[in-house]
Image (cartoon, rainbow, N blue to C red):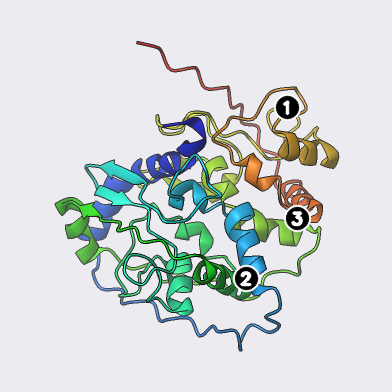
C-alpha cells in the first residue's frame, strides 16, 4: 500500500487498538439504545441553498477528505468515491469502504439525504444498522446541518458507479452489534459563522478529523484524551507510518513558535518551518486547497489550546527484510 493510501488504514488501526474492549464492554453492559431518528433536514430547512453542492464538494474533497478511504483507488483521493478499500481484523472480519456514488444497486442511490446525514453523524445506515466504527462519526457528529446536507447533496450529484462492496463481518462483530448501544449523540445544528476566527476553527478542525490523529488515546477502549486535544501521540498503533505531531502552542514540543504565516506555508507546501517534509499520510495536499481564511481559523483555534509539553519523536523507519 502506498504511503498516500495509509490514512484510512491508520484510522482503522486507531479504532482497532481499543475495539476488543469496546465490544466486550458493550456486550456486558445494557442492551438496547434504540435507533437514531432521521434528522429533519431538507433544502427547505437549512436556509439559502445556493451553492449547496459546491459546498459539499469542498467539505468532502478538501476538509474531511473522504476519498482517502472511499476512493476507488486510495492513491487518488480525488477519484470516484466508489469504495472497496478493505479493512481486515479478527475483531471485525473484513469491512470495506462503502460506495458513496448514487448508484441505486451498489451505492447511495436509494438513500435519502436525511439517511446520508444520519450515517455521517450517527453511524447508522439506511436500515438503521450500526456501521463499523472505522467511520469516524465520533468526530463527524459535530458537522453542522447545512454542511451535512451539502455533503449529502454533493454525493447524490456524483456520477453513479456500479461497484458492489461486500462486507464479511465475523462472529465477534456480529455478536457485539446485538448488544452495542447505537450512538445517540447528534450535535449538528448551526456552526459558528464562517470566518477566520478561533470559534470557526474549532468546528472546522473537528470536521477535518485533525483531532482523530493528533490526540493521544488511552484506557481499555483507547478513547481520545479530550483533556489533551491535539497534544500529539508518541505511541500510536503500530500501523501508523508516523507519529502524529503536537499541535498545541507549547513552544518547545508543539507549534508555539510558529507564526500564522508559518502554519499556512506548511499546509500549502508540506514543509514545516524546520525544513522537515510532512509525512505523506498527512493529507496536506487536500487541506492546502482550503481557503486562507479557513486555514487561519484552524491556526487561531489551535493557539487557544492550553500548551501541553509532549515530545513526539519521529517514528523510526521499519526494518527491511
Query: Label 1, on which residue?
Result: 252
Task: Tell which residue pokes out farthest to the bottom in this image.
Answer: 44
Q: Earlier in the sequence, mark 2 or mark 1?
A: 2
Marks 3/2: CA distance?
Answer: 19 Å
Residue 301 x/y as whole percent: 73, 52
Query: Label 2, on which residue?
Result: 53
Task: Tell which residue pokes out farthest to the top in this image.
Answer: 321
Residue 92 visible in the snapshot: no
Residue 39 shown left or right of residue 251 in the figure: left
Residue 175 shown left or right of residue 154 in the figure: left
Q: Earlier in the sequence, mark 1 or mark 3?
A: 1
Q: Quadrant of residue 32?
A: bottom left
Q: Residues within 10 Å of mark 3 (few under 14, many from 20)?
A: many
Task: Tell which residue pokes out farthest to the left in this image.
Answer: 171
Residue 132 x/y as whole percent: 33, 57
Query: Label 3, on which residue?
Result: 294
Q: Earlier in the sequence, mark 3 or mark 2?
A: 2
Q: Residue, x 66% and y 58% (percent of image)?
A: 204
Q: Residue, x 45% and y 48% (percent of image)?
A: 69
Q: Quadrant of the C terminus?
A: top left
Q: Residues within 10 Å of mark 2 (few under 14, many from 20)?
A: many
Residue 10 x/y as whole percent: 44, 39
Q: Quadrant of the N terminus?
A: top left
Image position of 190 with respect to 155: above or below: below
Amino acid at each position: 500500500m502506498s504511503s498516500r493510501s495509509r490514512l484510512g488504514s491508520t484510522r482503522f488501526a486507531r479504532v482497532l487498538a481499543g475495539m476488543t474492549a469496546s465490544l466486550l464492554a458493550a456486550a456486558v453492559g445494557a442492551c438496547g439504545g434504540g435507533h437514531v431518528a432521521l434528522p429533519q433536514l431538507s433544502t427547505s430547512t437549512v436556509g439559502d441553498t445556493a451553492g449547496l453542492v459546491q459546498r459539499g464538494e469542498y467539505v468532502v474533497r478538501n476538509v474531511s477528505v473522504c476519498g482517502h478511504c472511499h476512493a476507488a483507488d486510495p492513491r487518488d483521493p480525488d477519484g470516484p468515491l466508489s469504495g472497496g478499500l478493505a479493512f481486515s481484523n479478527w475483531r471485525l472480519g473484513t469491512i470495506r469502504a462503502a460506495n458513496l456514488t448514487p448508484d441505486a444497486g451498489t451505492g447511495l442511490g436509494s438513500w435519502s439525504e436525511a439517511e446520508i446525514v444520519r450515517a455521517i453523524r450517527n453511524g447508522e445506515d439506511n436500515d438503521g444498522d450500526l456501521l463499523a466504527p472505522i467511520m469516524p462519526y465520533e468526530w463527524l457528529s459535530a458537522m453542522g446541518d447545512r454542511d451535512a446536507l451539502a455533503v449529502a447533496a454533493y454525493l447524490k450529484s456524483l456520477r453513479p458507479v456500479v461497484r458492489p462492496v461486500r462486507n464479511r463481518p465475523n462472529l465477534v462483530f456480529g455478536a457485539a452489534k446485538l448488544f452495542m448501544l447505537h450512538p445517540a449523540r447528534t450535535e449538528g445544528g448551526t456552526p459558528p459563522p464562517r470566518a477566520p476566527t478561533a470559534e470557526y476553527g474549532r468546528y472546522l478542525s473537528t470536521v477535518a478529523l485533525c483531532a482523530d490523529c493528533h490526540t493521544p488515546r488511552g484506557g481499555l477502549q483507547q478513547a481520545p484524551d479530550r483533556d489533551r486535544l491535539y497534544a500529539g501521540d508518541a505511541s500510536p498503533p503500530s500501523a501508523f507510518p508516523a507519529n502524529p505531531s503536537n499541535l498545541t502552542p507549547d513552544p518547545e514540543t508543539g507549534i508555539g513558535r510558529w507564526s500564522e504565516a508559518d502554519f499556512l506555508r506548511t499546509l500549502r507546501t508540506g514543509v514545516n518551518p524546520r525544513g522537515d517534509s510532512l509525512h505523506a499520510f498527512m493529507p496536506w495536499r487536500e487541506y492546502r486547497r482550503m481557503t486562507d481564511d479557513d486555514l487561519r481559523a484552524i491556526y487561531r483555534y489551535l493557539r487557544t489550546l492550553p500548551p501541553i509539553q509532549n515530545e513526539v519523536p519521529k517514528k523510526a523507519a521499519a526494518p527491511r527484510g
